Amino acid sequence: MRILQIKQSLSFLILAICLSIVSICVSSKETAKNKRLTPEQFFSGSHLEMAQAIHRNDREKVEKLLKQGINVNELSEKNTMTYLLYSVMIDNRFEIAELLLKYNADPNKVSKILDDKYEFYYLPLTSVSVNKSIQYMELLLKYGANPNDFYRSKWGVALNAMPAINAAVRSAYILNKWDREDFMNDIKARIELLLEYGADINSIGAMGKTVVEWAESNPEIVLYLMDKAADHHIYGNNLLRTSKRLLKATPNNSYRQEIIRRLTALGYE
């Protein structure tokens, strides 16, 4: 009996050590990935406790604060950031973002981040459309995110708060195991998803650029948008000029050749 107890104790000790090692590795990874997005950088005062819980990935604490009646849509004092935006800016906080949405977090609320003398505006859907997995987009849309929503500051439509489809066409989200085809298919899936929810394929984003113009660096996606009937009247001249210029650098690019062929056939010169 004594030997059995010792074996059980050793088993529990080994298990505890293994779990501790896993916990340390996960914690280190999280710290490395999210060290730039510390809660103190964006939140202060009464808003800091919730932000810290989000940063720690403490779902239990987040839910406890929500049940206590914390205003899930109240803007922070230091900047004017929502808890929802913070949860989707940080890596691997999908479940917390979902929890906030279940407690009526507004997916269309704009956040403002101050950086020195500059102001940067963010919408959650725009943000995740360019740098998070498509599952984040699906989540926000499910809970009422407007794919055509945008914020116009005194400088014009904000880059990180422009219509989501303008952001999605320049998505930089990519997994290590993906090849180029996987990457292209992911961007196309983002476009399809947004269109299903009523996104305007002809919306104007930051710097007055159309969806097609935001995709100019990726001619395969440009052709995909043209196939989806993006209105050539609002981008034709600019796109032809840009495509001819870029083709000089890559004369064998069949996608750019096809763009030029189509636009020329439409009467652009």
Image (cartoon, rainbow, N blue to C red):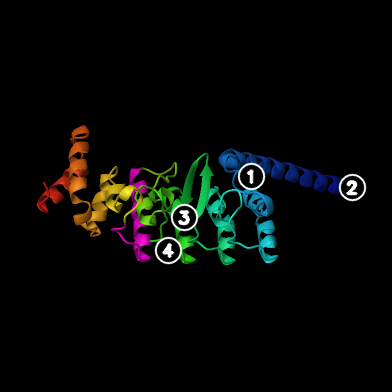
Q: Residues within 10 Å of mark 2 (few under 14, many from 20)?
A: few
Three-letter residue code for mark 4: Asn
Q: Which mark is residue 123?
A: 3
Q: Is residue 255 left or right of residue 189?
A: left
Q: Residue at x 57, y 49 (%)?
A: 79
Q: Which mark is residue 2?
A: 2
Residue that numbered label 1 is attached to:
40
Residue that numbered label 4 is attached to:
146
Earlier residue among tags 2 and 1: 2
The answer to which of 66 and 238 lies nearer the viewer is 238
Secondary structure beneath dot 3 equals loop
Query: Residues under labels 2 and 4: Cα distance?
Result: 65 Å
Find residue 151 and report its image quarter: bottom left
> Can I make out residue 133 in this image?
no
In magenta segment, residue 84? no
Q: Residue at x 30, y 53 (%)?
A: 211
Three-letter residue code for mark 2: Arg
In magenta segment, residue 185? yes
Which residue occupies the extreme right position in the image? Answer: 2
Secondary structure beneath dot 2 equals helix
Query: Residues under labels 2 and 1: Cα distance?
Result: 52 Å
Q: Residue at x 17, y 40 (%)?
A: 244
Residue 3 in picture, x, y percent from top left: 86, 45
Three-letter residue code for mark 1: Glu
Three-letter residue code for mark 3: Leu
The answer to which of 212 and 123 lies nearer the viewer is 123
Earlier residue among tags 2 and 4: 2
Query: Residues under labels 4 and 3: Cα distance?
Result: 10 Å
